[in-house]
Image: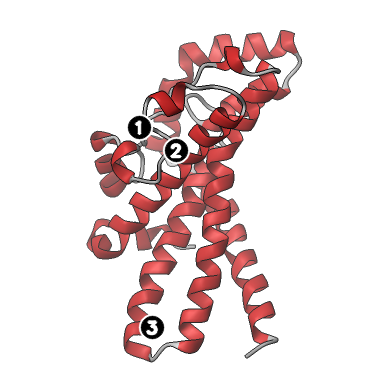
Amino acid sequence: MNILDLLPENLIFLLPALLLALTVHEFAHAYVSHRLGDPTPKWQGRLTLNPVAHIDPIGFLMIMFFRFGWGKAVEIDPKYYRNRRQGLVLVSLAGPAANIVTAFVLVIMHVLALAMLPSSPGDFIGSMLSTAVSLNIFLAVFNLLPVPPLDGSKILAGLLPSKYSYRFQSFTNQWGMLLILLLVATGITSLTVIPIGSLLHRGMYGMVIAVVGLFL
């Protein structure tokens, strides 16, 4: 995965990829919370794959031009969950997991498109699918960083023993946003996000190419 592929000069590929990645991510949060008994996402119209319901205009532009931004956060009410801590972990994990699943499906489509379509339309569709794969993987890995307000912080808080979870949340709720801004501004996040994302990227393509090659 080359993050340079996600720069603004490739907007024709980036725009649909970004809409898809953010929509899938936020819908997954809403759907899992709904399945756990929380009516809030349904009341707020978030149980839909319509991008309009999930896009925050400022966050969208930030991602598109600065590679750091956000979708419209899904409001949830954990009091409806049978197990609050477990429910929060599942809801938080749902977004990144949905992006990984989406990326894998897109990899299959990309490999098949390259194998079966003529070069001209195949190259265009391939570039669009490749951008969507990279963006979904990048969004998933980035959101798993254990820093608020990212999903990874909520997952870690739910997995830690109660005493340590409380201390972790107290500290990160106070300093989390500043910390993440510093990590992004200094490029430190790239030291983890890009290598892990690249590993997932190569693994997905390697697996799909090996399987598809058996039938072509």
The residue under label 3 is 122
Considering only vertical position in the picture, is 129 above or below 196?
A: below
Query: Is disc 3 surrounded by few (<14), some (14 to 19) or many (20+) residues within 10 Å?
Result: some
Classify mark 3: helix, strand or loop: helix
Q: Distance between the residues labelled 3 and 1?
A: 33 Å
The residue under label 1 is 72
The residue under label 2 is 26
Could you say where residue 68 lies in the image, as x and y percent from the top left? 36, 40
Contact? badges 3 and 1 (CB < 8 Å):
no
Q: Quadrant of residue 60?
A: top left
Classify mark 2: helix, strand or loop: helix
Considering only vertical position in the picture, is 111 above or below 200?
A: below
Of pointers 3 and 1, the one earlier in the residue sequence: 1
- Residue 151 versus residue 73: which sits nearer the camera? 73
- Residue 156 versus residue 99: which sits nearer the camera? 99
Q: Quadrant of residue 118?
A: bottom left
Classify mark 1: helix, strand or loop: loop
Q: From the viewer's perspective, is the residue at label 3 or at label 2 nearer?
A: 2
Who's the residue at 35% across and 37% down the image?
Answer: 54
Residue 179 appears in the figure: no
Who's the residue at 63% across and 73% down the image?
Answer: 208
Of pointers 1 and 2, the one earlier in the residue sequence: 2
Considering only vertical position in the picture, is 40 above or below 101?
A: above
| Image mark for residue 104 | none
Where does the C terminus fall, quadrant-wise?
A: bottom right
Type of residue at label 3?
Gly
Query: Is disc 2 surrounded by few (<14), some (14 to 19) or many (20+) residues within 10 Å?
Result: many
Residue 2 located left or right of residue 8: right
- Residue 165 versus residue 103: which sits nearer the camera? 103
Contact? badges 1 and 2 (CB < 8 Å):
yes
Q: How far apart are marks 3 and 2 (CA)?
A: 30 Å
